[in-house]
Image: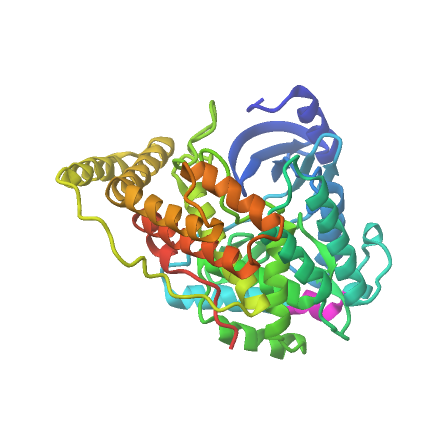
Amino acid sequence: MGGVEPEITTWLEEVAGGEVVSLHRVPGGGRIGFWVDVKSLDGDVHELFLQRGGRSGSHSFIGFERQAEVYRALEPLGIPIPHVWGADDGWDVFLVDRARGQTWFRAPTDPAVAQSVAGDFMDHLAAWHRAGARSLDLPSFGPVRTIRHHQLEQLAGIKASFEADGDEPVDLLASVQLDHLLHHVPDADGEPVLVQGDTGPGNFLYDGGRVTAIVDWELAHLGDPMDDIAWLSWRATQHGWPDFPARLRQYQEASGITVDPGRVMYYRLNACARLGRHFGLATMGPGTRRGMAAASVGADASVDRAADGSRFIMDVLHRRMRLTAQADAMGIDLPGRDVGVEAAPRSHATLYDEVLDQLSGIVEASDDRATASRAKGAARQVKYLKEIDRNGALFDAHELDDIGRLLGRTPRSLDDGRQALAASAREGRIDFEDYFHYHWERLIRDDWLMRRASGALYERGWPALV
């Protein structure tokens, strides 16, 4: 039924105590989600949500059974958490009440609503932090220790994943990142809290001016409350958040916990590391410049995040966020984002604009979500191709010059130069800050090529804390 195996349907009916009468797929936070209606023996219909794909194979992501433990622990506090019906790591499924509302992947158009929702979320964040980890029934998370102890545990997992992830050597940027985290663990003397991780806009639902459900606890762990503030600033960078410093002042008043900017910057870098040693790093091998990720073969374009080109746009934003997080945490000064000289526009540049007008018309005229999504993705591709057509060769030449200066010789090609530069950096023949600034200059050019496709995201950066 609805693309779900019969065994899963049987499981649904067993845990919900009734008959599945309706099931259809909906967007589920980048994974597979279904609205499920179950009719009980007394005739009532329960509106539920089934999530699949808990990503429990990664060191960072906890399985659905542990997430269910979190939901059950927070529900008595009055945190808006969907009621859990069942979870099974073997089937990789999680069944909860269907929450009302919409996600905040873009800020509400009414500023008053946006501020009300953000304020409501900050009160909930403050509430579960104020409660502390010791008051929550979380047996699978182990004994509650010190903040430092839990952070060292987290770093041990990150270090193990760096060592186990892939056959190629760890890039110098990633190894220095991990070394900094290991040797600069904050000395925080407060009580550990339940950290959601990846918390904030995009991972809750709201209706009107209130939060209706806080979801996606796959990165939950015990630790420093500033870890969550760092993740909140991450989500705010991607999706917007009204007056971030004011929201932090509200959090401080409601929680009794003082926001420490230095610790927040540390945990921003830590968040990047939790997502893997390759996260936010440019490829240093063949085929680095690529088109936007296409929708998966056979995927439903109405729910596939790659279909509208947003995944590749986020890739470039994440590179910038990662580099600035490392620079802020390590005290590295970065120059501005001016690309300097551009190539002259090509004579056929207006053809791109004509195609973009046609695609815009398709988006406006289509009532079909999948068609509109693919048209948006195609439009972003065209915007990107227009910039490459103008500046791609020039920017490649600038990068080749940068690599040549660092290596002391001119590489045969950009791919050869990138590989040689990465190897030289790992072997200590290139200064770390020189290598870091190469990546920054390269990011500036790649970001410039994506600026039209990125739209408002091109201007986004980590929000101010005070």
The location of residue 242, given as percent across then percent down, is: 44, 68
The location of residue 379, given as percent across then percent down, is: 29, 38
Residue 130 within the magenta-colored segment of the rendering: yes
Farthest residue in the top direction? Answer: 6
The dominant secondary structure in magenta is helix
Instruction: Name the residue rendered at 32%, 61% in the picture.
Output: 338
Q: Which residue lies furthest to the right in this view?
A: 143
Please identify the quarter of the rendering in which residue 111 is found: bottom left
Residues drawn in magenta: 126-132
Q: Which of 349 and 198 is in front in this view?
A: 349
Q: Which residue is drawn at 52% across and 69% down?
A: 119
Q: Position of residue 182 (x, y in %)?
A: 72, 61
Q: Nearer the viewer, residue 124 or 202?
A: 202
Residue 128 image offset from top left, x and y in percent: 69, 65
Q: In this view, does 346 lie above or below 266?
A: above
Does residue 288 appear in the picture of this structure? no
